[in-house]
C-alpha cells in the first residue's frame, strides 16, 4: 500500500467518520457535547425591565439638574428588592429604593446608583443626573422572543448551558459521544506504578492518549495492553472493538519482526484504508474500518502518538459528535530560528507561539525527536512545514496550528 500525504490521510479519515445518533440528555450532562437541535427562544431574557444597579429608581426629568454641588432631594416612596413585583408606579419628585435585578416601577426611566446618593431612607439626596434608560436592563436585551439562540452543531460550554438554563431547558438533544477504547502493544511496556526492569518502559501513551480522548469530549472506555503476539493481539483488538466506536492502537504498526497489528487486522477482516503517511513524526500511521467502526494504528513513540491524535483522530471524533469546526485555528507565524528537515516528508514541528506587535512568532521547543515527550509539554502549537521544503530560514513565515485553542475560536 503506497504512502500518502497528510491531507489525503485527513480526507480519508473524515470521509469514513460518520455522525453518531442524536440523544436527549439532562442539561447538566451536556457539557462538551454538540447540539443536535435548533434552539428558538419562546420568551424574552431578561423577561422584564430591571435594575442593573443597587440604587434608586427615578424619573430622569426629576434629576436633570442634580450634581454634587447642587443635589436634588427626592422623597423615598418605597423599596423594591430582587424577586419582588413593583406594586405602585413612581410619583413625581419621588424615588424608589431598588436592588439589582428588581423590576423597574411604572413611570421610572432611570436608576441612580447608590454611590451617587446619600443613601437616605425617607428622603434621599441625588448627586448626579441620569439619562433615560441609564442603569436599566431592558426586557429581551439579551435574548428576544422568537430569536434563534443556538444552532445544531454548536458546542455546549458553560455559557451555552447557562443560556439554556435561562430558557428553562432542563433537557437538550445532542449528538452522542463516540466511545473510544485504547490498546497499547509491546513487550516493553509496563504499568506506570511498577518498578522498571532492564529494557522496560512505563506506559505513558495510555495516559496521554486517555487525556486527549477526554479533552476532545469523547467517552473513554479505558485502555488495555497486549504483548507482542499475533493471537493475543487479535483477541485484544476484538475485545476493544466490542466496547467502542473507535479503537486506538499504539505501537505494533511498523515493519518490525514483532509488529503484529497489521497482520492481526487483516486476519480479522478489517478494510485497510491506508498505511504510512509521508510525515514526521508519525510516518507509520494506519487506518482501518471494521464495519462502521474506526481503527487507528498510531506509532508507539510518545510524541508521534500525541501528534497523530491531534492531527487525525481528534478531528474524526469531533465530526462524529456533530461539530462544524474540526481543525484547530491556524495562523501565519514568523519562525525565530532556522529549521532544517529532510525532503519528501511533511514535518509537524513543536513550537512555542507568542503574539508580539500584532504578529505571531514561533520558536521550536528544542530537539524534535519522536521520543522527546517534554517537547509536547513546552509547545502550544504545531508548525507545519511542507514535504518539498528542506530549510526554513529564521524570519520566514510558517503555518502554525494553535493546539491550545478550541476549533471554533
Image: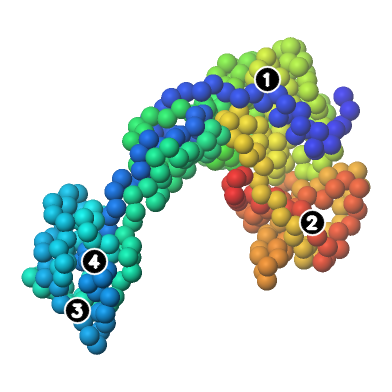
**Residue where numbered disc 2 is placed:** 398
Mark 3 residue crowding within 10 angstroms, few (<14) / some (14–19) / many (20+): many
Structural distance between the alpha carbons of marks 3 and 4: 12 Å
Q: Do the residues bearing badges 1 and 4 touch, measured as CB atoms within 8 Å?
A: no
Tell me the colour scheme of the image. rainbow
Q: Do the residues bearing badges 3 and 4 touch, measured as CB atoms within 8 Å?
A: no
Structural distance between the alpha carbons of marks 1 and 3: 85 Å
Earlier residue among tags 1 and 2: 1
Residue 366 visible here:
no
Under tag 2, what secondary structure? strand
**Residue at image location 71% in from the left, 33% down from the top:** 298
- The mark closer to the camera, 2 or 3, is 3
Under tag 4, what secondary structure? loop
Mark 1 residue crowding within 10 angstroms, few (<14) / some (14–19) / many (20+): many
**Residue at image location 14% in from the left, 63% down from the top:** 91
Structural distance between the alpha carbons of marks 2 and 3: 64 Å
Mark 4 residue crowding within 10 angstroms, few (<14) / some (14–19) / many (20+): many
- The mark closer to the camera, 1 or 4, is 4
Earlier residue among tags 1 and 4: 4
Q: Do the residues bearing badges 1 and 3 touch, measured as CB atoms within 8 Å?
A: no
**Residue at image location 77% in from the left, 66% down from the top:** 336
**Residue where numbered disc 3 is placed:** 72
Amino acid at each position: 500500500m503506497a504512502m500518502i500525504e497528510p491531507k489525503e490521510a485527513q480526507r480519508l479519515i473524515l470521509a469514513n467518520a460518520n455522525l453518531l445518533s442524536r440523544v436527549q440528555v439532562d442539561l447538566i450532562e451536556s457539557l462538551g457535547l454538540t447540539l443536535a437541535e435548533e434552539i428558538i427562544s419562546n420568551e424574552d431574557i431578561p423577561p422584564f425591565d430591571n435594575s442593573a444597579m443597587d440604587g434608586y429608581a427615578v424619573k430622569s426629568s426629576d434629576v436633570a439638574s442634580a450634581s454634587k454641588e447642587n443635589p436634588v432631594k427626592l422623597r423615598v416612596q418605597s423599596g423594591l428588592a430582587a424577586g419582588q413585583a413593583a406594586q405602585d408606579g413612581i410619583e413625581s419628585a419621588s424615588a424608589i429604593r431598588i436592588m439589582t435585578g428588581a423590576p423597574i416601577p411604572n413611570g421610572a426611566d432611570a436608576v441612580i446608583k447608590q454611590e451617587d446618593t446619600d443613601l437616605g431612607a425617607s428622603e434621599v439626596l441625588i448627586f448626579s443626573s441620569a439619562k433615560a434608560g441609564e442603569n436599566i436592563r431592558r426586557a429581551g436585551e439579551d435574548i428576544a422572543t422568537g430569536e434563534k439562540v443556538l444552532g445544531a452543531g454548536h458546542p455546549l460550554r458553560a455559557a451555552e448551558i447557562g443560556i439554556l438554563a435561562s430558557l428553562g431547558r432542563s433537557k437538550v438533544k445532542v449528538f452522542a459521544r463516540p466511545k473510544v477504547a485504547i490498546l497499547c502493544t509491546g513487550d516493553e511496556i509496563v504499568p506506570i506504578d511498577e518498578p522498571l526492569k532492564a529494557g522496560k518502559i512505563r506506559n505513558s501513551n495510555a495516559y496521554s492518549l486517555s487525556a486527549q480522548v477526554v479533552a476532545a469530549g469523547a467517552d473513554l472506555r479505558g485502555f488495555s495492553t497486549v504483548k507482542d503476539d499475533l493471537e493475543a493481539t487479535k483477541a485484544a483488538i476484538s475485545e476493544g472493538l466490542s466496547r467502542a466506536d473507535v479503537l486506538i492502537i499504539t505501537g505494533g504498526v511498523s515493519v518490525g519482526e514483532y509488529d503484529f497489528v497489521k497482520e492481526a487486522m487483516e486476519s480479522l477482516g478489517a478494510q485497510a484504508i491506508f498505511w504510512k503517511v509521508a510525515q514526521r513524526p508519525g510516518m507509520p500511521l494506519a487506518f482501518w474500518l471494521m464495519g462502521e467502526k474506526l481503527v487507528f494504528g498510531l506509532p508507539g513513540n510518545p510524541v508521534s502518538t500525541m501528534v497523530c491524535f491531534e492531527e487525525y483522530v481528534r478531528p474524526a471524533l469531533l465530526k462524529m459528535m456533530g461539530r462544524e469546526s474540526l481543525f484547530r485555528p491556524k495562523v501565519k507565524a514568523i519562525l525565530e530560528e532556522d529549521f532544517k528537515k529532510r525532503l519528501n516528508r511533511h514535518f509537524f514541528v513543536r513550537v512555542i507561539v507568542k503574539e508580539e506587535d500584532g504578529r505571531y512568532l514561533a520558536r521550536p521547543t528544542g530537539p524534535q525527536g519522536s521520543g522527546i515527550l517534554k517537547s509536547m509539554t513546552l509547545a502550544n502549537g504545531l508548525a507545519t512545514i511542507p514535504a518539498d521544503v528542506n530549510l526554513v530560514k529564521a524570519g520566514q513565515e510558517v503555518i502554525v496550528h494553535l493546539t491550545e485553542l478550541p476549533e471554533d475560536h
